[in-house]
Image (cartoon, rainbow, N blue to C red):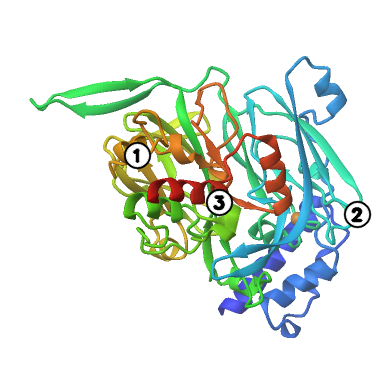
Amino acid sequence: MNKRVSMLFTVAAVAVMGATLFGSTYTQTQITGQSIETISTDADMMDQIRHMGGLQLTMPKAFAESDCDVLEASGRTVHNFDLYAQSVELPIMGDKTYSAMTFNGMVPGPTIRVMQGDVIKMTLVIPDDEPLPHGNDMHSAQITSSVYESVMPGETSQYCFIAESAGIFKYHCSGVKLALMDQHVLSGMYGIAIVDPANGYKKLMVEKTTGSGEVDRVFYDADALEFQLQYSQLYLTDTGAFDQSAMFGHQNDLTVVNGMSFGYVPNMAHNLLVKGDTNKNIFVAQPWNDLELKQYQSQLLFVENDQHVRIFVENQGNEPVFFHIVGEILDRVTQGNRIQSAATETWLLGGSQGMIVDLVFDEPGAYAAVNHDYAAIFTGAATVFVAGDPFNLNPTLVDAGIIEAPVPSYAYVLGNPSDAIPPSGMNTIEHPAKNIHGLYTDEVVMEMQESGEYVALWEVIPAVADILTS
Ligand SMILES: [Cu+2]
């Protein structure tokens, strides 16, 4: 069977299965009746499924309660999770844009964080002026999937559920009656829910050897400095539209972390601090290096040495993620609330799979968290952490009056990027400062600036440059 026919067979089989499982109004005859000869491309066939109206979800109600009135009266803590859909042009590398689809004007969508056993009340609004229907499938829920049904422009959907299982879980647009789901998700409609374990996180144990060759166990408190990294890909035409044929062929253009390729590499401030010149690049590729880029200017992630760091990692995409940190070992990998590995070099995440990585950066230095698939590294999946003061900047910063005393990480000077920081939980060490960075619309940035919680580095960098060069 050649690839094309095999692909058609698979999709037809899925469609038939969908019809059987979901009680679709489209019968097997109708679906297999789509003549193979008339279908020239995979994308054409998806188009036909779309024109049939997609696959209708009419599953029976499951046993788990999804009625908000019942769950709100249950005495459990209820968290509102309010989403709206917005299709908008957002930047990609090379001064171009793409047709993004977002939750709340940002890619990824907002992170919700709750305690195991809490209720999440999800409300999805599709504004009148949004051209397409959307839905929201939350992997942290265990309820009937009929609540993920697509919602028309001008309409709202709402469901509630108990977050029973601890861990990190994807949420994503469920498309338009399942059809177009690939386009909507891979264009940006995804995010995560973090469900903290009811008894809190565990202490982190790291093995060290003594000089005499004995193994010593070092325990770090459960509290950690936390980050979130979400991996995906962009499949685009020359004009920045979604390219479904490229998706079928697994031929992505860019690999993105929290929506951007190479979004966490050095910028003008780092060039200035290390090289004394905003325009002398300290990293081989600095594609987002310009003050005019504002929220899109790349940022680094700063941590202290000997500090417990926790990273929530989710593979939102269509390709595997071989998560590795160059120069470090993943001291602990947790999935759900079960430890999967200790002291491992790399951990594999399949599509729609998440994990919690706990580690300590032992020595001052720069460390790149990568998807150790070379195609992914070279198309954007390189995220640089800087631990401690590897460039010995403390004396300069103190002399210039930028800081009063030496600091354990550059986060005290520049902050950490807002899109890499999840909401705080029960075992969170607060970041010393947060800067505005992310695949956000300007409206989102305006609200962040008004909140007074964040540093706008594009305003701070020129001031720092003045101080350091005067
Ligand atoms: Cu959508």
Q: Earlier in the sequence, mark 1 or mark 3?
A: 1
> Which of the pair 245/3 is nearer the observer?
245
Type of the residue with mark 2: Asp
Mark 1 to mark 2 CA distance (whole Å): 47 Å
Mark 3 to mark 2 CA distance (whole Å): 34 Å
In the image, the residue with mark 1 has its CB under 8 Å from the nearest atom of ligand 1: no
Percent of width and height locating residue 223:
46, 23
Badge 1: few (under 14), some or many (20 or more) residues near its Cα, within 10 Å?
many
Marks 3 & 2, CB-CB < 8 Å contact: no
Type of the residue with mark 3: Trp
Q: Is residue 130 above or below residue 40?
A: above
Number of the label disc, if any, that sits on residue 128: 2
Q: Which residue is drawn at the image coordinates 47% and 52% (left, top)?
A: 264
Residue 262 in view: yes
Q: What residue would you read off at disc 3?
A: 458
Quarter-of-image position of residue 232: bottom right
Q: Is residue 423 above or below residue 173?
A: above
Q: Earlier in the sequence, mark 3 or mark 2?
A: 2
Ligand 1 is found in the corner quadrant, namely bottom right
Q: What residue would you read off at disc 1?
A: 387
Q: Is residue 221 above or below residue 18?
A: above
Type of the residue with mark 1: Ala
Q: Is residue 148 left or right of residue 223?
A: right
Q: Is residue 404 left or right of residue 327?
A: right
Q: Which residue is drawn at the image coordinates 32% and 49% (left, top)?
A: 326
- The kind of secondary structure element at disc 2 is loop
Mark 1 to mark 3 CA distance (whole Å): 23 Å
In the image, the residue with mark 2 has its CB under 8 Å from the nearest atom of ligand 1: no
Badge 2: few (under 14), some or many (20 or more) residues near its Cα, within 10 Å?
few
Percent of width and height locating residue 6:
60, 73
